[in-house]
Image: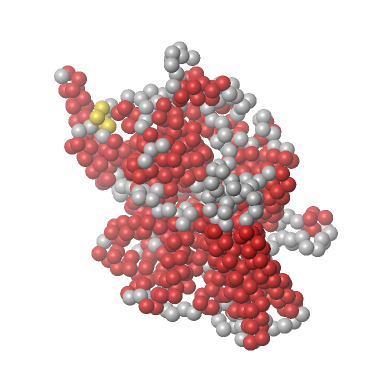
């Protein structure tokens, strides 16, 4: 080790403490530790004792239920013995999705408070608790009534929306008690003083309301023709249950994902009832509330593509991610990245790129990647010379790319497969070159920044031993099994299940062997991790339902077509802006789901292939996480780096600027999405990479080993833009222009050296 400073600063002391620790996974210094630890939100409850055991059991059972349902497992299928009250798999699709949402509501209201907790927990009982228990009575009554309806239907009663007696019973004995309990529970949740270690009675009320909604909808959808929704034959109870269910979903989304998505969903809901008064393409038919809500909780809305994906692929890969976390594979990924790239100039920044890409295979959320890897890489970037703003910006930009990194690609890829009907494996293959271009562009920007600042890499004694990392390369086996299984033709569900099992098996070769306790912990972690994405998908389903039921998506597409008549590039720019605006403050899943309903159909009508159109929208929905003024990933990174959030978002936008060109590249040249011959694909990948290099060089102002003057910088950007189209002539112009600029740069550097 280098000689110690006589007065080491705080960063040096922390580095030494980190070097002194060892987890048994590396022979050298431990760089990554706790990457797999689960972050705790400000409004997240923390339980202990018996309460923790109960909640952990609920969470684990919820995840295990999905794994069993998706694979068709049941005790009856294994033993041949039918056991009453146990679920029979495979479940009917709509019932499965209803239970999926209801379970998330119960877990979500139990684990997340309506408000953030203070530093000091007040504790104790409160008079509002008594009021909350009062609201529990109508919620329980609604459950009892729904069960009664199920009994009557089973006995042969013809249930419909025309019979006045049935309508009256549904309104006064089910709907009114349910809505009173739901509204009262939501309002009391906002007013209730915060206690972190206990379950608030008001959240018990909301959980029971979620159960009441599920019981009624399962009863009705299991026994009635579903095409009655939206007609006078639809029972009024469907609409009442949907109103309560929509309110519960929006309240849970507010708790776990913030206000941005709620505000947008609220605007869309208001539009349903004022659209007939709006002019132009925003004008919508007058829709009665009963008709709208009788349809919004069907596959035309909440139970549609977004929840279809969250209840299958997303929950499955969350379980996979939880198993990888429980076996500490995330720590290994980050240590591997340090061993591979830590010695390069500006090493920690390049580690952030590699580590975030690897972690993106586990965690498909931008902010989640920032929290997981940024707490380690950002302080190290600052230590080697990066400013706080730049350190946070690099991590935000790198973490954002995790959502376009195959094979998992976050939730958006699964939703794309559901909406377009394109096999997921085709989407994953198409994402290879765009994801490489994204990370290559970030790498070039980081490398040029390090060169300008004269940075060094990390010392060898500060890094894990690369040979030690290679000896444990088998920890990549679960990812490899997932990829191989997908390309062998296994279903996504079967491939994900095999990869999950592999994660448990490879852990037996490490100090973190997964036994029954660790596996139980993984299922519990999966149930908890799934709450946010399920709530977001369900809330996005509300917006998708409004778009489809009002027809505003089709009218928006016609506007896009009119713009395209003047200029197709202008239409693409307009589509880009809409995707980014939708993504500001919204998770990528919701942003893409809405943009896919509003923007993508118009692009397809322009003659753009469906995969290209949806990838174009998806890509910009992803990079919205680093686009000012609302950039969630940048804000999360700023919280770690201590920099100004807006300055960090501007810096991350600059670092990721080359990535904003990539979607236009695959619009002009579909070979970047693997659509073409091998020669076309390879040429497109190489020329696009060179174009990204030139653009990064121009933006950073670093060329031929030195700083570039403004003229050369501008010329580099122009030459890079010639590489976008992917044609032979444009590529030749771009390469020729780059050669001329290279010679000019060499001449300038020679004169500078001689002077």
**Quick one: 429 or 377, which is closer to the camera?**
377
Structure colour scheme: secondary structure
To which quarter of the image does residue 29 belong?
top right
Q: Please indicate, yes or no, whether residue 68 appears anywhere in the rendered image.
A: yes
Q: Residue furthest front?
A: 127
To which quarter of the image does residue 166 belong?
bottom right
Q: Relative to 342, is 620 above or below?
A: below
Q: Relative to 296, is 327 above or below?
A: above
Q: Residue at x 60, y 29 (%)?
A: 472
98 vs 288, left or right, is right
Q: Residue at x 37, y 67 (%)?
A: 557
**Quick one: 667 or 411, which is closer to the camera?**
411
Q: Position of residue 645 (x, y in %)?
A: 38, 43
Q: Quadrant of the C terminus?
A: top left
Q: Position of residue 348 (x, y in %)?
A: 44, 30
Q: Residue at x 64, y 42 (%)?
A: 323
Q: Please indicate, yes or no, whether residue 407 appears anywhere in the rendered image.
A: no
**Quick one: 7 or 484, which is closer to the camera?**
7
**Quick one: 182 or 281, which is closer to the camera?**
182
Q: How many marks?
A: 0
Q: Position of residue 440 (x, y in %)?
A: 39, 38
Q: Relative to 84, is 25 above or below?
A: above
Q: Residue at x 33, y 32 (%)?
A: 449
Q: Position of residue 270 (x, y in %)?
A: 44, 70
623 vs 465, left or right, is left
């Amino acid at each position: 080790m280098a000689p110690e400073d006589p007065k080491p600063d705080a960063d040096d002391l922390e580095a030494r403490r980190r070097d002194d620790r060892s987890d048994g996974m590396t022979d050298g210094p431990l760089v990554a530790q706790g990457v797999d630890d689960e972050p705790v939100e400000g409004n997240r409850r923390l339980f202990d004792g018996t309460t923790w055991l109960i909640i952990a059991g609920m969470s684990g059972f919820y995840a295990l239920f999905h794994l069993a349902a998706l694979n068709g497992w049941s005790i009856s299928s294994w033993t041949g013995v039918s056991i009453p009250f146990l679920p029979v798999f495979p479940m009917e699709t709509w019932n499965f999705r209803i239970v999926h949402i209801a379970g998330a509501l119960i877990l979500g209201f139990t684990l997340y408070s309506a408000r953030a907790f203070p530093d000091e927990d007040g504790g104790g009982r409160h008079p509002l608790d008594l009021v909350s228990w009062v609201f529990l009575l109508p919620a329980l009554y609604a459950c009892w009534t729904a069960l009664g309806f199920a009994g009557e239907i089973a006995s042969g009663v013809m249930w419909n929306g025309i019979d006045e007696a049935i309508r009256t019973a549904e309104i006064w004995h089910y709907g009114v008690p349910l809505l009173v309990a739901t509204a009262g529970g939501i309002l009391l949740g906002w007013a209730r003083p915060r206690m972190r270690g206990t379950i608030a009675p008001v959240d018990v009320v909301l959980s029971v309301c979620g159960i009441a909604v599920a019981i009624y909808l399962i009863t009705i959808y299991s026994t009635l023709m579903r095409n009655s929704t939206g007609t006078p034959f639809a029972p009024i109870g469907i609409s009442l249950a949907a109103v309560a269910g929509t309110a519960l979903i929006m309240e849970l989304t507010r708790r776990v994902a913030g206000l941005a998505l709620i505000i947008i969903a609220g605007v869309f809901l208001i539009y349903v009832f004022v659209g007939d008064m709006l002019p132009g393409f925003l004008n919508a038919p007058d829709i009665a509330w009963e008709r709208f809500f009788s349809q919004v909780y069907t596959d035309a809305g909440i139970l549609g593509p977004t929840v279809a994906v969250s209840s299958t692929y997303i929950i499955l890969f969350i379980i996979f991610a939880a198993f990888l976390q429980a076996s500490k594979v995330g720590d290994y990924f980050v240590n591997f990245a340090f061993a591979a790239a830590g010695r390069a100039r500006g090493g920690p920044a390049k580690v952030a790129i590699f580590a975030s890409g690897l972690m993106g295979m586990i965690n498909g959320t931008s902010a989640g990647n920032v929290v997981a890897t940024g707490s380690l890489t950002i302080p190290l970037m600052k230590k080697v010379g990066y400013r706080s703003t730049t350190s946070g910006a690099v991590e935000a930009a790198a973490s954002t790319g995790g959502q376009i990194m195959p094979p998992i690609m976050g939730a958006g890829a699964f939703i794309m497969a559901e909406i377009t009907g394109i096999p997921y494996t085709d989407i994953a293959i198409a994402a290879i070159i765009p994801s490489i271009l994204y990370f290559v562009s970030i790498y070039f920007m980081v490398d040029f920044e390090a060169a300008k600042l004269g940075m060094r890499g990390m010392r060898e004694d500060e890094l894990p031993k690369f040979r030690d990392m290679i000896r444990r390369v088998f920890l990549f086996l679960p990812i490899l099994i997932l990829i191989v299984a997908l390309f062998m033709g296994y279903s996504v569900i079967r491939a994900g299940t095999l990869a999950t099992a592999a994660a448990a098996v490879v852990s037996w070769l490490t100090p973190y062997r997964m036994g029954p306790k660790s596996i139980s912990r993984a299922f519990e972690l999966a149930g908890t991790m799934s709450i946010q994405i399920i709530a977001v998908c369900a809330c996005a389903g509300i917006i998708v339902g409004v778009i489809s039921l009002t027809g505003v998506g089709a009218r928006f597409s016609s506007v896009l077509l009119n713009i395209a008549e003047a200029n197709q590039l202008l239409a693409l720019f307009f589509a880009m802006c809409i995707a980014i605006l939708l993504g500001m403050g919204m998770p990528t899943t919701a942003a893409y789901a809405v943009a896919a309903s509003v923007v993508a159909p118009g692009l397809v009508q322009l003659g753009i292939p469906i995969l290209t159109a949806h990838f174009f929208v998806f890509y910009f929905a992803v990079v919205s996480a680093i686009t000012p003024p609302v950039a969630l990933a940048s804000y999360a990174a700023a919280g770690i780096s201590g920099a100004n959030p807006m300055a960090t978002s501007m810096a991350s936008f600059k670092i990721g600027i080359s990535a904003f060109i990539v979607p236009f590249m695959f619009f002009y040249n579909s070979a970047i999405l693997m659509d073409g011959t091998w020669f076309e694909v390879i040429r497109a990948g190489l020329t696009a990479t060179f174009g990204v290099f030139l653009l990064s060089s121009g933006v950073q102002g670093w060329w031929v080993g030195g700083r570039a003057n403004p003229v050369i910088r501008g010329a580099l950007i122009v030459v890079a833009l010639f590489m976008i189209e992917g044609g032979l002539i444009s590529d030749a112009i771009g390469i020729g222009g780059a050669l001329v600029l290279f010679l000019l740069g060499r001449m300038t550097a020679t004169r500078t050296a001689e002077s």
